[in-house]
Amino acid sequence: MTAKPGRIATIDVVRGVAVCGILLMNITAFAMPPAAYDNPRAWGGASGANLAVWVVNFVLVDGKMRGLFSFLFGASILLVADRAEAAGESAWRVHYARMFWLLVLGLAHLWLVWSGDILHHYAIVGSVAFLPRKRSNRFKLVFAAVLLTMQTASYLSLPRVVAQAQRDAAAHPHDRRAQERLADFNDEFGVPSQPALAKDIKIHRSDYPTILADRWAENTLTPFQELAAVGAETLAYMLLGMVALSSGLLTGAWRPRTYALVALGCFAITVAAYAVLAWLAARSGFDVATIAFTTLGASAPLRPIMICGWACLIVLLARRGGWLVRRLETAGRMAFSNYLASSLICTTLFYGYGFGWYGALQRWQLMLVVAAVWALMLAWSQPWLARFRYGPAEWLWRSLARGRPQRLLGSALAEA
């Protein structure tokens, strides 16, 4: 693999896998009512091939690719700051200019394109993660552990609240407030009512102004709600990403045997635990309280372990090189562009102003769409970077952050 001076090819490969992997979960949010993301009974099928897809995604993908992205974002904070200081620039000015424009672009994506945007959240949390970047790895690890403990405690409180709402609704069938509270939890983790599902389907199969109005009404406060809900976990992952970079994990500096042993240990622990959680969810009939427990509370302490395992496995495979690794590397160098492109492609496929497939495909059928989008990512990234220095979204972000258009023409893949 070749890369520009200052670029770390293994990080680009990990990022390429992450941008592909995150679509495995995002595709459900593009194509189905929100509750289907966690609960297969909500929409898309909960048996046969559909159940198998849910199980594999739950065990190996859900939260892990997002976490891997967060790891990489934390590592990039260190890389950008170090390069700015080496060039005699202010790391503070460079970083916060990048975060400001990432916030602007992320909010535009959130409100104008798709409600599942993560970029605005990274911009906000990344502004905080920058502050302890020069502290020791030990400090970052302890800080991350505290944050993850807080997040886990918060997640674990939710199943109890949901279970109490179920009991209240059953004991007081005519209590409007009790019924509405349970309905809210069903809309998020369970099986929404038929009227709620029909309304959601109708909106997403409508024209762009209708979808835009609904998105704005539902997501005006999303940046604040998301920060409160998962901000601690995201910050912890960014700090762990900084440690992964400085320790050599993400740079490929460890011995192959070390990567293999760490990956094996991480997957041995977490795959078995996640399999048990998947079994509990299915055994309960995907009960709303059980889903809240398995997907949030019980999963939280397992996620960082599997994320570490994924990072080690990808870096180990990246060291072997080959056609696929080179394609993933270029897809990772254009992760911002590929992330936005997947939103444009999928909203066009599923929303009413495009093909209107929203709610029309089963869960297993969505995997065919994912495979097609992956093929596009891997097909276009390398030819683009053979002709241009940056992906289109990366060029826009860099130009805005630096206050002037950056030179775009010229191969990004040419050796120094």
Image: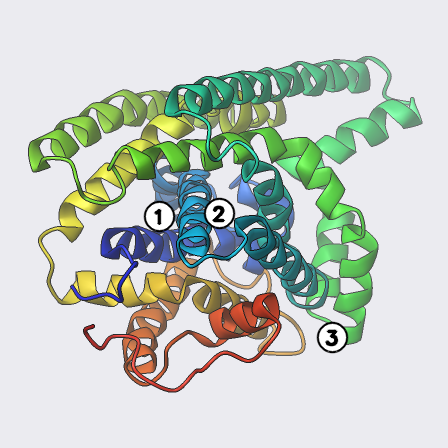
Residue 340, percent across and down?
A: 52, 67
Q: Residue at x 59, y 29 (%)?
A: 232
372 is higher (above) or lower (below) than 151? below
The Cα atoms of the two marked residues, 2 and 1, are separated by 9 Å
**Structural crowding at the residue carrying mark 2, measured as other residues with C-alpha within 10 Å and reported as few (<14), some (14–19) or many (≥20):** some
Q: What is the three-letter code of the residue carrying label 3?
A: Tyr
- Is the residue under label 1 in contact with that under label 2 (CB below 8 Å)? yes
The quadrant of the image that shows the N terminus is bottom left
Q: Residues within 10 Å of mark 1 (few under 14, many from 20)?
A: some
- In the rendered image, which residue does mark 2 sit on? 45
User: For mark 3, what is the residue?
Assistant: 208
State the CA–CA distance, disc 2 to disc 3.
28 Å
Which residue is found at the position 64% from the left and 62% from the top?
101
In percent of width and height, residue 351 lies at 63, 70
Q: Secondary structure at mark 1?
A: helix
First reached walking from the N terminus: tag 2 or tag 3: 2
In the image, 234: left or right of 215?
Answer: left
Q: Where on the picture, by quarter, is residue 332?
A: bottom left
Q: Look at the numbered disc 3 and give the secondary structure of its residue.
A: helix
Task: Check disc 1 and report the residue beneath it.
Answer: 49
Looking at the picture, tell me which residue is in the foreground, 327 or 216: 327
Please indicate whether residue 221 sits to the left or right of residue 238 in the image.
right
